[in-house]
């Protein structure tokens, strides 16, 4: 009897331990998946804000009455600039105050030499050069194309949407920035998530860039002296989700040398904590300046896990026979529909990179070429491939080669316009059908070439590589095949001339 009890107890302990390990493993996977979903939600909020910014730019900023005022600023005397600044401020201040209701924090005009001309959010601050402190403004000034991304500012930080401005003669007269506050993203994100989110920045970076008299907009982040948070976000956090639990866990972390070392080096951090019979998780993701690719702080997410509620619900669901039949019939119909959509999707998309394939590209280029011939629109081709791709496969293996192709496809997809048609042409070769004029397409190709070179240097999962480009216009050819032959020869020219080049 005693042996039976011993064996029973031992077996119970072993099975319980195995079950606990499995539960913890599943919990970890569940939380990681949950954070990935939250990051996608955050990206969707950024994309929605970008669309709002585009609408404000098109309908309010890039208008004749605004352009007619601002175009006079560059060649005016200091006294005249004062009057122009006041006129522009009067013209837009009501609109700017309305913008703030939609989370727009900054509206900032810059002269062609990158000098600040008018900050609607701080009209008293103007005349300072932004060349060395605002890479986004410098980029737009040099390339005359809009750009988006996160960047620290001289007053606030946020996601920048910077646009070039042109007069009626298409002469460049400066740029304008529409920026959304980090608090806006926080509010929108927390509204639909049981998750607390914070944006914090390295203290030395803030103190180096922000106007000295504007440092009052920042305060020390919680227990960490070398990180700052904007006061408006800190004030909003007074009644934050899970405030007590977050503070207790952060207090423990502040004494953890390994964690502090990771923070000082701006490394990724993720962990799970058990407190008061509940599970909490924390994720620190480096906040990157999209224009310099430098880590400047963290996006912090803190949440209570709903994993156990999730698995409990899955056990207590009682399915009636009629419900099972209904679900089965609906599932069969849904499965067929899904398989049909999947078949169509596979026919149009490259299975490895999930971008359009050559078949789809051939269909679209024929449509656009006909439209171009009838409507006289601008069409250009960019063809590029990875330099020494065979060497990557031979050195690192085909799995790394595939990862490099996937990374490249995602990088390009995130740096071209939504109406540009991007496809995998074959192997390591890709094609973009651009609806921009030829000269602007060349600029875009050069930007993509430089981005690939820089971004792959910093990626630890794939080897550094470069790409060679060819760019041609379709407006001067009589057939699609002629255009493709020309751009293919230009790509070969870049290869012949040393690679990592743009030929046109």
Image (cartoon, rainbow, N blue to C red):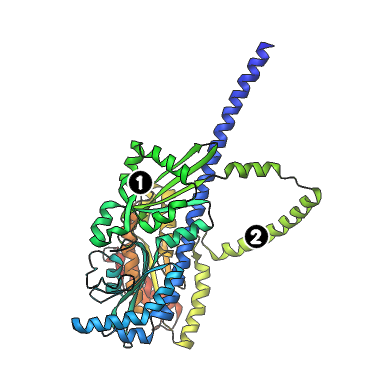
Between 168 and 339, the residue placed more toward the observer is 168
Q: Secondary structure at mark 1?
A: loop
In the image, what residue occupies the spot 63% across and 24% down? 12
Between 48 and 85, the residue placed more toward the observer is 85
Check the image and report above or below for 133 versus 108.
Answer: above
Between 382 and 320, the residue placed more toward the observer is 320
Report how far apart the C-alphas of labels 1 and 2 lie in the structure. Answer: 40 Å
Mark 2 lies on residue: 338
* Dot 1 crowding, Cα within 10 Å, few <14, some 14–19, many 20+: some
Residue 292 drawn at (x, y percent) = 30, 60
Answer left or right for 280 relative to 82: right
Answer left or right for 349 relative to 112: right
Mark 1 lies on residue: 267
Residue 319 drawn at (x, y percent) = 76, 47
* Mark drawn on residue 386: none
Residue 270 drawn at (x, y percent) = 43, 43
Check the image and report above or below for 266 versus 255.
Answer: below
């Amino acid at each position: 009897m005693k042996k039976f009890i011993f064996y029973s107890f031992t077996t119970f302990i072993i099975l319980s331990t195995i079950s606990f390990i499995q539960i913890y493993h599943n919990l970890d996977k569940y939380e990681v998946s949950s954070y990935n979903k939250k990051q996608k939600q955050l990206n969707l909020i950024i994309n929605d804000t970008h669309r709002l910014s585009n609408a404000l730019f098109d309908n309010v900023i890039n208008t004749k009455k605004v352009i007619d005022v601002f175009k006079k600023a560059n060649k005016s005397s200091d006294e005249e600039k004062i009057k122009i600044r006041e006129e522009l401020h009067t013209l837009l201040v009501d609109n700017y105050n309305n913008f703030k209701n939609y989370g727009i924090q900054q509206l900032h005009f810059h002269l062609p030499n990158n000098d600040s001309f008018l900050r609607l959010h701080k009209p008293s601050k103007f005349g300072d050069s932004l060349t060395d402190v605002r890479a986004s403004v410098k980029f737009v000034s040099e390339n005359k194309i809009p750009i988006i991304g996160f960047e620290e500012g001289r007053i606030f930080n946020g996601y920048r949407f910077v646009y070039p401005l042109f007069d009626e003669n298409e002469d460049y007269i400066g740029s304008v920035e529409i920026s959304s506050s980090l608090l806006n993203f926080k509010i929108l994100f927390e509204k639909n998530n049981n998750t607390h989110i914070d944006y914090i920045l390295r203290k030395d970076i803030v103190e180096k860039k922000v106007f000295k008299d504007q440092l009052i907009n920042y305060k020390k982040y919680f227990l960490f002296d070398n990180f700052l948070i904007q006061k408006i976000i800190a004030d909003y956090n007074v009644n934050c989700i899970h405030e007590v639990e977050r503070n207790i866990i952060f207090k423990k972390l502040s004494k953890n040398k390994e964690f502090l070392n990771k923070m000082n080096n701006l490394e990724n951090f993720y962990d799970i904590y058990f407190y008061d019979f509940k599970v909490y998780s924390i994720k620190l993701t480096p906040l990157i300046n999209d224009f310099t690719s430098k880590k400047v702080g963290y996006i912090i997410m803190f949440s209570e896990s709903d994993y156990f509620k999730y698995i409990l619900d899955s056990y207590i669901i009682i399915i009636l026979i009629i419900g099972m039949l209904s679900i089965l019939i609906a599932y069969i119909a849904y499965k067929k529909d899904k398989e049909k959509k999947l078949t169509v999707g596979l026919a149009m998309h490259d299975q490895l990179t999930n971008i359009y394939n050559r078949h789809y590209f051939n269909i679209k280029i024929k449509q656009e070429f006909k439209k171009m011939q009838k409507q006289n629109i601008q069409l250009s081709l960019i063809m590029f491939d990875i330099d020494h791709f065979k060497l990557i496969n031979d050195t690192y293996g085909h799995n790394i080669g595939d990862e490099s192709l996937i990374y490249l496809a995602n990088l390009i997809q995130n740096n071209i316009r939504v109406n540009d048609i991007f496809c995998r042409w074959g192997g390591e070769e890709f094609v973009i059908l651009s609806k921009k004029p030829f000269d602007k397409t060349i600029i875009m190709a050069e930007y993509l070439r430089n981005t690939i070179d820089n971004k792959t240097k910093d990626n630890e999962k794939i080897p550094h590589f470069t790409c060679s480009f060819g760019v041609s216009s379709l407006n001067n050819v009589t057939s699609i095949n002629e255009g493709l032959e020309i751009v293919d020869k230009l790509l070969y020219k870049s290869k012949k001339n040393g690679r990592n080049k743009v030929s046109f």
